[in-house]
Amino acid sequence: MLSERRPAALRDVQRLAAGVVERVLGGRNLDATLRKLWADTPGLAPEQRAAIQDLSFGTLRFYGRLKAELDALATKPVREAPVRCLLLVALYQLESTHVTPYTVVDQAVEAARTVGQGRAHGLVNAILRAFLRRGEALERAAEASEVARYSHPQWWIDKLKQQYPAQWQDLLAVNNRHPLMTLRVNRRLGTPAQYLERLATAGLEAQPIGESALRLSKPVPVERLPGFGEGLVSVQDLGAQFAAQLLDARDGERVLDACSAPGGKTAHLAERNALELVALDQSAQRLAQVRATLARLKLEARVVEGDAGAPERWWDGRPFDRILADVPCSASGVVRRHPDIKWLRREEDLLQFAQTQRRILDALWHCLARGGKLLYATCSVFAEENGQQIEAFLARHPDAVLLPSTPGGQLLPDERHDGFYYALLEKR
């Protein structure tokens, strides 16, 4: 742990970022790993946290290319995971940041003295200096491999080629860009125009892009958002904000958000209408986030712990007028926000997600009132979880009708929003 009194040198930032990358490549969630690191190192200043986060995200975002370059530079595999990940972080710095090459190499060599065994510092020095001599040639050579060129697993690339033959390259490129930062104004406490004025006073530039949405010109920590703690605004992608609009609940209706954590869509529903709102999730820990979100925004909902696919354990038998089924999925549409997903997902995971989605859909359909509407939602771009899932559902349920909606169907990630899928179903 770093001393609370001593600022972290670049070598410490590199070492800590390498540790994050090592844990993620070992199967850990990136966000959870960073949260644990912040808890374990309370002496880190905000700018140090920002640097560690940038290096971790960037290294994972371009891991396919960085791994190919490291493999080409090393005369034999670098088997010590801490040293290998330190090299990946330093290579990302050399390629993508403004830190002088000498400083990156010098500090990485010093970091290697603390994370490696034996002559690890000599190995790090040799590999990074070789990259400085051969960097452009290595980058060109990496183009021969699709995994290196696009920094996605091969199965992911192949699936996008099959399902989006005209768009797959654009989708891969979008996934490797920095994400947008979009806000949702709490209309119970103010208007988008009023909040734009608050942002301008705080020196932040934004533009309206939706019903209650504002897009910041430059991402900032939430602490810099005026009135965030008082509930004036939330951070939520425009694509996610479409859910409450499409469900179109009316005042007084009984509404279920079936997979509600961490609570963004639940809160948006409560901001738009006075509802008998139930927020369901099977994770007690994640439900704590839902409660915290509702409390910050000064909203109310009944929070229930339970499995959306087993309503007999939590449902009181009273039908819902509206149900939002934002089901577990591969999250393949939000990869630019969560670059670890690319390397943690396996192709076989899609079948498991599809089975879970089917189970939840069939179970929730019995909880919906006649004439009611259910909105099926994912943050995925894969057809197995989206269009194919709904086609199979309609074949099983003759009383289900797919309603036209705008936006509806598959939304691909672009300059306005992340990737989402929406299907609005009515129970006839």
Image: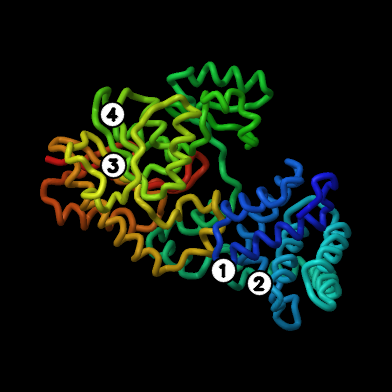
Front one among 352 and 293? 293
Q: Which quadrant of the structure image shows residue 261?
A: top left
CB under 8 Å between discs 3 and 4: no
- Nearer-the-camera pick, 242 or 364: 364
Mark 1 vs 2: CB contact within 8 A: yes
* Quarter that holds the C terminus: top left
Q: Residue at x 38, y 53 (%)?
A: 328
- Compared to 202, does 291 lie above or below? below
Circle 4 Cα neighbour tier, 10 Å, few/some/many (<14 / 14–19 / ≥20): some
Residue at coordinates 51% horizontally, 59% vertically from top-left?
341
Circle 1 is placed at which residue position? Answer: 147
Looking at the image, do the residues carrying marks 1 and 4 touch, with CB atoms under 8 Å apart?
Answer: no
Mark 1 surroundings: few (<14), some (14-19) or many (≥20) residues within 10 A: many
From the viewer's perspective, is the residue at label 2 or at label 3 nearer? 3
Q: Helix or strand or loop: what does disc 1 sit on?
A: helix
Q: Label 3: which residue? A: 375
Above or below: residue 228 compared with residue 70: above
Q: CA distance from mark 2 to mark 3?
A: 42 Å
Compare marks 1 and 4 and give the one earlier in the sequence: 1
Badge 1 amino acid: Val
Q: Amino acid at mark 3?
A: Leu
Q: Position of residue 223 (x, y in %)?
A: 64, 32
- Nearer to us: label 3 or label 4: 4
Inspect this view and state whether residue 108 appears: yes
Q: Position of residue 352 (x, y in %)?
A: 35, 64
Alpha carbon separation for disc pair 1 and 4: 48 Å
Q: What residue sits right under mark 2 in the picture?
A: 68
Residue 367 shows which numbered tag?
none
Does the rendering let one see residue 426? no
The residue that mark 4 highlights is 276
Mark pair 4, 2: CA separation: 54 Å
